[in-house]
Image: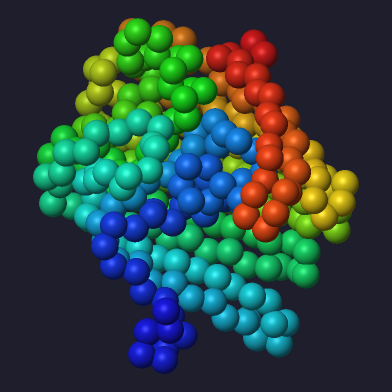
Amino acid sequence: KDVMGSGFDLKVGTIDIPYGWEYGMRTNNGDDMRNDFITNSLLDINGGDEGIALSGSFDMGQTSTPLAWEIAVLNGGAVADGNPRGTGANGRSNDDLAWAIRAEVGLMENLTFQASFYTNDTKKDGDQDPLNIGSSFLVSNINGDALNANLLGLASSTAYDRDMWELSGKYDYGQGYFMAFWGDIDADSGGATSIIQGNRQWNYWGAQGRYNFDENSYVAARWNRLEPDYTIAGLPNNLGDPELWTIAAGYKLADNAVVKAEWSSFDEDGGG
């Protein structure tokens, strides 16, 4: 922290990839107390890789608007970080670096905006992208006994270059909060057009909120949706538009102990 009095923080080694609204708020990643739910989101975007990250925060101009940012340069090949992941292999041979940028700014005292961008070139060496996408809700229900070709480039990214971005906003209203997010995932196979290798793109969005009854108890709800935005000749879109609804309640027993209960409903075709 505060490297050489610069005010910047530096991380070196196997680091969590800074991306998205869920960064630093995932269950099973040491962040359970910050997650209002037991499970993670529908896409559960997360991952770790060897690299270097620089982060910092400062006020902007006369408004004293806090801005927090983090930029990471990563090895680009998957590496096991000891944390449960949605999917992924652990082979590494990729010579191309991955980049992740995340920034969060307080536009008002109770309104926060977040933006993230991630890019990785893995197809040259056939590596698995270290940024995992796809919770067990999505992968297990869609795949069944075999990998659904519609998840290639998403939950399985071998031989794809991926560019991703996400925007989110969070409003704290005193008794809780409301937040919404929107993002895009572009998996490029380098011009291949076969069923297995065709380019793919997905839009994803969702919302969640929390209401505090008092300082110890709360209820929370969330909705997530994934929408494919591509057409590949010969490949039926049997992925649909998956949706996840979750309702949770929690009670704080102590500073480091929370009891939670959760109900979730997964729809493979988003009500269609």
Q: Tell which of 262 and 172 is nearer to you.
A: 262
Spot the residue most to the bottom: 5
Residue at image x 72%, y 49%?
A: 253
What percent of the width, then of the height, locates residue 43?
Answer: 50, 34
What percent of the width, then of the height, locates residue 211?
Answer: 82, 45
In the picture, measured across the screen, residue 191 lies left or right of residue 82, that is: left
Residue at image x 62%, y 67%?
A: 105
Q: Note whether 215 is above or below 224 in the view shown.
A: below
Spot the residue most to the front: 254
The quadrant in which residue 198 appears is top left
> From this viewpoint, is residue 233 visible?
no
Q: Tell which of 184 and 79 is nearer to you.
A: 79
Residue at image x 57%, y 81%?
A: 58
Q: Note whether 73 is above or below 247 in the view shown.
A: below
Residue at image x 53%, y 51%?
A: 31
What percent of the width, then of the height, locates residue 129?
Answer: 28, 41
> From this viewpoint, is residue 39 visible?
yes
The quadrant in which residue 171 appears is bottom right
Looking at the rendered image, the quarter that the N terminus falls into is bottom left
Q: Tell which of 35 and 217 is nearer to you.
A: 217
In the picture, measured across the screen, residue 265 lies left or right of residue 250, that is: left
Q: Tell which of 175 and 164 is nearer to you.
A: 175
What percent of the width, then of the height, locates residue 144?
Answer: 40, 9
